[in-house]
Image: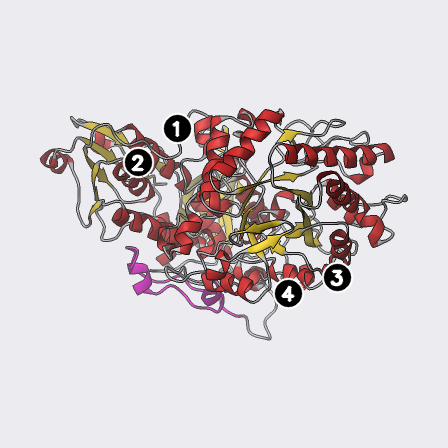
Amino acid sequence: MGNLSRRSFLAGSALTAGALASFGIAGCAPKAAPEPAASEASTDADVRAHAAKLNPQNETDPVATGTCPSLFTEWTMGSLTLPNRVVKSAAGFIGVTSQGITGDLHMQHYGSLAKGGASIIYCDDFAELYPHFRAIPDVGKFVDWKEDELRAFADNIHENGSLAGYQLATMGLEFSGFQPDPTAIFQSSDCMDMTAQEISDLIADTIIAAETLKKCGFDCVEINAAGENIGQTFMSRNRNKRDDEYGPQTFESRTRFVCEVVRGIKERCGADFPVQVLINGVEENDKNIGDNSLFTTVEENKAMCKLIEEAGADSLHVRIGPCGQHVAEFAGDLYFTGYGIEGTSGYGTQFDFQRHWQGMLKADQSGLGIMTKVAAEIKKAVSIPVGAVTYMDPARDPEFFESLIANGELDFILMNRPLSVDYDYLKKLEEGRLDEIRPCTRCMHCHWDSDASGNLTFSCRTNAAHPFRFASGQLTGGYEPEPASTAKNVMVVGAGPAGMEAARVAAQRGHKVTIYEKDGALGGLLEFANNVKGPHENLAVLRNYFVKQMEVNGVEVVTNQEVDAAFINEKSPDAIIIATGGKRASLGLSSSDSTNVVAFDDFMTADIADDVVIAGSNVQAIDAAMYLLAQGKHVQVVTPSEPGAIGAGHSFWVRTYTQPTMKALGVRFWPKAKVNSVGDGTISITTETGIEQELSCGTLIDATDCLPNTELAEGLSMDVYTVGDCVRPFNIDEAIFSGNAAARQI
């Protein structure tokens, strides 16, 4: 496989012709940015190269062997004895919850999670449980609650084999002093908005909520005192400027709110009702890096966690604590979205993980265990169990996660996305079937996003059966596809992600499936994308998963086979799924003596000049720009698209993190512009103002949008389905979904 690891790249290595040949591209390798001589003056390229080298990664190769026996040992949390060390953290599916607590999709999802085997299934604070307060519109709670509905929800989790936990979160509640900012994302009230009476009311409301949940069959609760939640705003000196008994003057006053909540729940619900507390383990400001004098340190947290334990807490959940982008508190892997540019903040700044966060984040593993050092340190100060969460997917490195539990660094591991991506995750992990685990690719389409038509959506790139796909009517039936009423002979043409997902689902439904690929290997452009993006998104793992699924589901695979209408008619399938990919459009421009015009598919093997212009702003173009920035190139992007469409195909949050970084490193975007001609070391463009502008350019990369490619489907007599880029070029997420949807119709 032609992987270019970040560490080897940053050490100055380059793709070899042999590595490139493995994914069907041959030629010269791109050159890494040269190290400047000691006497040379600093240049812009040096600055960009330094940014790429600031936090070099030590990415392990994906593994297909190994087990984590310590993850499957018993442990205790308060009065509960739990069968394994994996806990599903409280993060769910916006848009599905709004269907109601006992809505079919909501119940299906949580029932499937429970069947998956995690010891506790924590759900979001989705219900209006606080009598004195309502949620800020579009931020907080989704539905009013009824006792019978809460009881049915908890029973559903129990009946499917797990314990039911509920996270009591106070983000999104509106207090009297709150003045909303209409331009803000995930805005929330904090402790400075609250009167003394409101503090008293919220403490009482939270205690009553816990009592209600116990009455309705929930086994435990988690108090969210992290992120933008009220408990965190009391505990953080940066946010707490009160001068009363809840002020920041002492550890006792900073933790008073959280401790009174914990104490009250224990008094009301009894010692046998466990309470877990979620905290920011260590804080930094990713909006104003360097403004960290008032942010909570690990040592401060150790002192406060002792007080929280004394108040009666039964366990601690430790998270990263960014104070600028709320989403990064549970998706810290966003700091690693740019190829080689590690530590991006979303504000055009960059963390230095050796110095920021007290140098405590295990950032050389890119989110695999970013908080483990912090949690292990806090664990030394308390006697109750301590767990940590970020991306934390032990399928990438089972030995690492095994050591965390076996060595006593952590007591349990919390995760959400890996369990939602593959409900059978833990079963496969325990049985050592790691190559059968559907991987989370950290794309963040699941949070909230826009689809190809600009509509608000939520999705999972690799698990097309995301609950919101059903809630929105994009899919029908259940999460698992129904068996076919009649088994058919199904031909799939093209073994990219869309074609392989279609083949997987069709075979799973009972059809006889044969997949044909014109090249010698399966995966389409996944290997190419993996090399452009780097290992962060697990695209090589995704390819391997699909290949394994062909074997597991009995799909016949035929490679090195061109398919045309005559071949299709000869084979005469009952149904055909065409997944041949899109057609690459072209600028129609030729190279000059000093400016080389390179097709996008060839850019990784071409000799790239220092001054690069990329024509196009789709997801592939932006990925290429990030890749070239890491090599010290000066990049400009010229696109006919609107500014808001730049990076279309990336999730909202990936765009939020990558584009400010690109701009900070000198990338100039030219939206609503056109490339006119190629000169001698320059190109001519027409800007959105109608001005003709000359840009310095040694290499012009033609990354114009792909076009549909449906000719093969024309004139065929059997049932025909077109999927992926061949019908609607956009991104991997939509390609996989289209393959899944088509296979459900056969």
Image coordinates for residue 79, horizontal then vertical, percent: 63, 49
Which residues are the magenta region?
A: 6-35
**Dot in front, 3 or 4:** 3
What type is the residue that disc 3 sits on? Glu
Mark 3 to mark 2: distance in Å? Answer: 55 Å
Most frequent secondary structure within the magenta stretch:
loop
Mark 4 to mark 2: distance in Å? Answer: 45 Å
Left or right: where 324 falls relative to 564: right
Tag 2 or tag 3, which sits nearer the N-term?
Answer: 3
Tag 1 or tag 3, which sits nearer the N-term?
Answer: 3
**Dot in front, 3 or 2:** 3
Crowd tier of the residue under label 1, counting other residues whose Cα lies within 10 Å: few below 14, some 14–19, many 20 or above: many
Mark 3 to mark 1: distance in Å? Answer: 49 Å
Residue 172 visible in the snapshot: no
Indicate which disc residue 32 carries: none
Indicate which disc residue 475 carries: 1
Q: Secondary structure at mark 4?
A: loop
Q: Which residue is mark 4?
A: 354
Tag 2 or tag 4, which sits nearer the N-term?
Answer: 4
User: How many numbered marks have been drawn onto this rendered protein structure?
Assistant: 4
**Dot in front, 1 or 2:** 1
What type is the residue that disc 2 sits on? Cys
Tag 2 or tag 1, which sits nearer the N-term?
Answer: 1
Vertically, is 263 above or below 187? below
Q: Secondary structure at mark 3?
A: helix
Q: Which residue is mark 2?
A: 726
Q: Which residue is mark 3?
A: 299
- Confirm or deny contact between disc 3 and disc 1 (CB under 8 A): no
Q: Residue 20 in magenta?
A: yes
Image coordinates for residue 16, horizontal then vertical, percent: 34, 65
- Confirm or deny contact between disc 1 and disc 4 (CB under 8 A): no
Q: Nearer the viewer, residue 525 or 711?
A: 525
